[in-house]
Amino acid sequence: MMNDDLFEILEDATLGTEWQEWMKEAERASVLVNLRRPETWAVLRQPAKNIAAMRWLTGKLRRLRPSLSPKAPSECALYILAAHCRDNTVTGYVTDTFVNSYRTQHRAGTLFCMEVVGRMTLHDEYPHLNALYNLMMGLALKEWRRLLEGDEDYPCFLTEADFRRVERSLPDFRYGGFKEMVRIMTGNRPVGTLTAGELAARCHQSETVFRERFKEEFGQPVAEWLRERRKEDILAMLSDTAIPLSDVSERNGFHSLSTLSDYCQRNFGKSPSLLRKDTAG
């Protein structure tokens, strides 16, 4: 059963109006909906065909519930009901509810809206939702890039687990997985300035969980992997004679050329200048 008072509020609003019986029908259908079983959503097709009633309902919902809470079953059922309606005004409510959840960084609401639209457009039965699906795809990719790039001004509000859920909801979204995420995060900057804690934070994981997952996926501790990558980065930069040694030092987290030189002697047995000569030759 629906356990919040939204239907009571809506039914009270229909008293003495032409929507009274229709609202009861919509509630009876909504009670049969299992939010985790999309095949049960079909019971909402019939009440969704009443365009005038649906416009009245979504007008009320805009004021009562401008954003969606997946913890409220009636809100979710009514959102699915609105998604079934092929009227542009009603579809506008479906779109605006998603956009409001996204703009306020409401994770659960954003993900639920994506799941509803993704499931309903899976077999091209609801073409009126295609534009919203495309919008969701674009925003999902935008947030994925933010997560990978570690955007400090506009950080991603979704987690790695969230993107796995998005991939299940939006068939055209491809989540690359933990390994690809780590490699992309470390691919655009020398890892000498990175720590396991920073990578864990970008993945929205605790450092303990991140270290365990990293060892499971890569077969070695994160610190060891970072050390190896640091060596590769330094050798690659030394092979490029256009990069001054001072830049090699700074970009790899060394405080001075002498510190870089000490590192190279310990790890490669040669000074940076000799390594550059060898690799460039």
Image (spheres, rainbow, N blue to C red):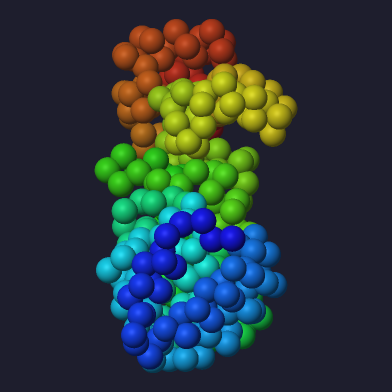
Res 99 → quadrant:
bottom left
Nearer the observer, 90 or 214: 90
Q: Residue at the far front: name it.
A: 16
Looking at the figure, which quarter contains the N terminus? bottom right
Regarding residue 99, the answer to whether it shows in the image is no
**Residue at position x 58%, y 87% in the image:** 46
Residue 114 lies, in percent from the top left, at 51, 64
Residue 160 relative to residue 110: left or right: right
Residue 235 lies, in percent from the top left, at 52, 27
- Where is 215 relative to 100, above or below? above
Residue 43 relative to residue 240: left or right: right
- Where is 256 relative to 88, above or below? above
Nearer the observer, 67 or 5: 5
Regarding residue 266, the answer to whether it shows in the image is yes
**Residue at position x 56%, y 13% in the image:** 267
Residue 157 lies, in percent from the top left, at 40, 46
**Residue at position x 48%, y 19% in the image:** 274
Residue 160 lies, in percent from the top left, at 54, 44
Nearer the observer, 88 or 35: 35
**Residue at position x 61%, y 85% in the image:** 125
